[in-house]
Image (cartoon, grey):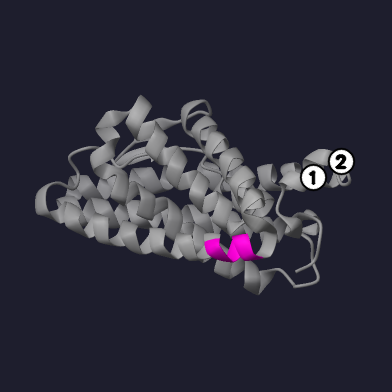
Amino acid sequence: MHIEPGIVVGAKLALSYATAAGAATYGLKLAADAVRESRFSGLAIRSVMTTLLVLTFFQILPHYPVGVSEVHFILGSTLFLMFGAAPAAIGLSLGLLAQGMFLAPFDLPQYGMNLTTLLVPLFALQALAKKIIAPNTAYVDLKYGQALALSTAYQGGVVAWVAFWAFYGQGFTAGNIAAVSTFGGAYMLVVAIEPLVDLAVLAGAKALKGARISALMTPRVYNAG
């Protein structure tokens, strides 16, 4: 996952540092809340799992450059539903950082932009989930429409932030508008597939209820809020 190198350069990178710092600060608040709810060990285990999954999503699942960025199956809503907002945020942050440090060092200058692009839509998804999922509904009982709304919110947020960085860095030229439009259109494939993945994963979790592995998931998977 990365904004293509050279799209935002020089002094303009300062904005990405500021937005990333804001997103990271809110992520730390979520982490502190998670520790109070399920202890540090629960947060740590889920964060390790999400980090490994994010690296897998970025490196192994199909991904291809389109326009101003790459189209990835980030599965942000899946990470949120299975592990919770804080572990998902930590996994996205550390997975992205590990990718830049060890596999794609040319991405490191874009880390602030990419971090913002991944985390802010996750936080918006969390807020949406509180509105569309009743407090007495466990995640394993979600309907397709709810999964579609969550996935659309996350992926739409990713596209919106990519577009923002592209226009911020390169302006509203005809070529840039076309590149952003091509990228946004390609992401509709992800929106079409991700809700089905969410429901399939939740169905698998429902079948595993009571198994030892179920303890690794966020409690809301099985329990009402």
Q: Is residue 190 visible?
A: yes
- Label 1 packing within 10 angstroms: few (<14), some (14-19), many (20+): some
**30 horizontally vs 135: left or right:** left
Secondary element under disc 2, as helix, strand or loop, is loop
Q: Main secondary structure of the magenta part?
A: helix
- Taking the spot 46% from the left edge, 56% from the top edge, the residue there is 156
Picture layout, residue 92 above or below residue 120: above
Residue under the image location 31 percent in, 44 percent down? 111
Q: Disc 2 marks which residue?
A: 211
Q: Position of residue 133 (x, y in %)?
A: 71, 68
Q: Are marks 1 and 2 in contact (CB under 8 Å)?
A: yes
Using residue 179 as the reference point, say whether residue 174 is left or right of it: left
The magenta-colored residue range is 32-36
Judged left or right of residue 92, residue 162 is: left
Q: CA distance from mark 1 to mark 2?
A: 6 Å
Near mark 2 (Cα within 10 A), the count class, few <14, some 14-19 or many ≥20, is few
- Residue visible at 40% across and 58% down in the picture: 24
- Residue that appears at 32% across and 59% down: 21
Q: Which mark is residue 131?
A: none
Amino acid type at circle 1 is Ser
Q: Is residue 213 above or below residue 195?
A: above
Residue corresponding to mark 1: 214
Q: Closest to the observer: 52 or 62? A: 52
**Where is residue 159 drawn, in percent x and y?**
40, 52
